[in-house]
Amino acid sequence: MELLDAIRNRRTTNSRFLEKPLSDDHIRTIIEAASYAPSHFNSQPWRFVLIRSREGRDRLGKIAGRSMRAVMEKGEFWKRYLKYFRFSREEIDKSGDGIYIDNMPAPLRPFIRYIFSEKGAEVMNKLRVPYILAIDSKRLITTSPLILAVLLTKEEYRKGELSGMYSMLALGMAIENIWLTANSLGVGVQFISLPMEAGGEHWAECVAMIDPPENYEVIALFRLGYVDPDAKRPTIDWSSKQRKDISQFCFDETFGNGWRSGRV
């Protein structure tokens, strides 16, 4: 039951962490947990780079801030993920998925549905939403004690081949081990998505910082730190605690035949 509780209570930490370095013991425990994830033929294709220096975190924070602003000003983010935005508890109760945008500055609240729409980019820019989000993004990363870069060896991660799919599956399971172990130690985790979303020079700068050999590919970045129970939420924030009913995504015998407990 303790494991199930850990799985059910796992959350992304959107707020700032305590200004306290992660202990070497906790880092070792978290990374060791990743190594116990299953992988094809025990290939263990993952590699990790720890970024803890103030210089490194400041640099990544600046990249993330620029990336956030670039993506938001273009409006591409909203177009790509519009179908996942929820603006009321009624909507999340009905869908069981997506993100509930429940934290907005008071002046923006009347415009929330329009801002988070395909046509809202112009208004969003006038209301300086990308600027607000960029500042929050930069601060969150620069104040995070640890940035974790996740890589795969190209010897196994060969796109378009089965080994590429197997490697990505293995990495996903390793990341879940990291997340659950971190949470058990009071350490929060958040995926840093915007430099990758922005692509181009933004992501290239992140990769250049990590400086991997040619036979390794940087897949993702995460920020980790001790959870601060008193931390304020970001200026614009959302939650995603709701889950679909099992019958909506688990089927008996054939697809679409919703699973029901006790059915024979």
Image (cartoon, rainbow, N blue to C red):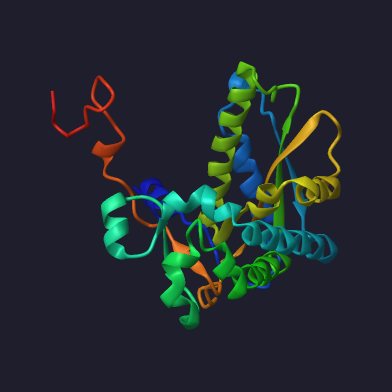
Say if residue 31 shows up in the picture: yes
Say if residue 180 shows up in the picture: no
Q: Is residue 58 above or below residue 254?
A: below
Residue 36, given in percent of the width and then of the height, sits at 58, 34
Which residue sits at x=26%, y=20%? 254
Which residue sits at x=43%, y=50%? 83
Determine the residue located farthest toward the bottom in the rendered image: 107
Residue 249, given in percent of the width and then of the height, sits at 31, 35
Q: Number of callouts in the render?
A: 0
Residue 232, given in percent of the width and then of the height, sits at 53, 77
Image quadrant assignment for residue 256: top left
Q: Is residue 245 above or below residue 94?
A: above
- On the rendered structure, is 225 left or right of 255? right
Q: Is residue 69 above or below residue 165?
A: below
- On the rendered structure, is 241 left or right of 193? left
Which residue sits at x=30%, y=58%? 91
- On the rendered structure, is 80 left or right of 64? left
Which residue sits at x=69%, y=64%? 141
Nearer the observer, 236 or 34: 236
Residue 165, given in percent of the width and then of the height, sits at 59, 24
Nearer the observer, 92 or 60: 92
Q: In what quadrant of the picture does the C terminus appear?
A: top left
